[in-house]
Image (tube, rainbow, N blue to C red):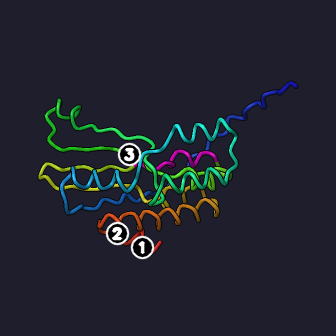
Amino acid sequence: MTTTARPSDGTIETVPHEVHRLTVQVNESFDAFRERYEHAVPVFQSERFAKLVEEGADWQTVLDATKENAPHSFIIYWSAEFTSLMRLAGDRGRCVEYLMGNHTFAQRMYRYNPAVMLYAPLRTAIFEDADGATWFTVDQPSTAFGSFNTPQITKVGLELDHELAALLGFLDVPVPPGLQYS
C-alpha cells in the first residue's frame, strides 16, 4: 500500500483567547497541602496502562482502570519541584508543578480536535510565597478548552470545571466562583 503525503497549503491559524488563571490561598503549610493533594490526585499507573495498551484492552477496561486510579477524577502524569533550582538564584519561595488530568476526559475532546492535548492534562502548581503563604493555581479548564470553538469540547471543559471544583472542595480549598457557576 502506497500513501502519498498531501501537500500543505501553508495554512496558519491564529486563535486569540482569554484563559482565566485561578489562584487560591490554602490555609495550611506547603508540605501538608502537597501531601494531601498528592494523596487525592494519585500518580498515573503507567505500568498498568502500558499493559492495557500491550494487551489491546477495550475502552471499558481503560475506563474502569482509570476510575480506580483517579478517586477524585484526576491523575498526576508528571510533577517537578523547582525550589532547589530557583534557590540557586536566591529565590525563597517553594513550588511544585504538576500535569494533572484524566485521559478519559481528554479522549472525549481529542476525537474532535487532537490539538486539545495542548491543555490536557491541566497544569497545576502548589507554591509558597516569600511570606510563607501556600497557594494552589490552575488555568480554568473551560476557558482553555473553549478556545477550540467546538461545542463538544466546550462541554467537556465545563465538566472539568465541575470536577476541579469538587476536588478543591474535597481538599477544603476555597472554590473560585468561576468553577461553581460555569
Residue at 47% in and 44% down: 44
Q: CA distance from mark 1 to mark 2?
A: 7 Å
Residue occupied by mark 3: 98
* Sequence-earlier tag: 3 or 1: 3
Q: In the depicted view, which residue is nearer to us: 159 or 51? A: 51
Q: Which residues are magenta?
A: 114-123
Q: In the depicted view, which residue is nearer to us: 177 or 34? A: 34
Give the secondary structure at mark 2. loop
Q: Which image quarter: residue 164? A: bottom left
Label disc, if present, on residue 180 of the rendered structure: 1
- The percent coordinates of residue 156 (x first, y second) are 57, 62
Label disc, if present, on residue 132 of the rendered structure: none
Residue at 18% in and 50% down: 129
Farthest residue toward the left? 131
- The percent coordinates of residue 72 (x first, y second) are 44, 60
* The N terminus lies in quadrant: top right
Residue 122 within the segment the image draws in magenta: yes
Label disc, if present, on residue 175 of the rendered structure: 2
- The percent coordinates of residue 182 (x first, y second) are 47, 71
Q: Is residue 52 left or right of residue 2?
A: left
Farthest residue toward the right? 1
Q: Amino acid at mark 3?
A: Tyr
Q: In the depicted view, which residue is nearer to us: 47 or 118? A: 47
* Sequence-earlier tag: 2 or 3: 3
Q: Are marks 1 and 2 in contact (CB under 8 Å)?
A: yes
Residue 5 within the segment the image draws in magenta: no
Pair 3/1: label in front:
3
Q: Are marks 3 and 1 in contact (CB under 8 Å)?
A: no
Q: Is residue 126 left or right of residue 3?
A: left
Q: Amino acid at mark 1?
A: Gln
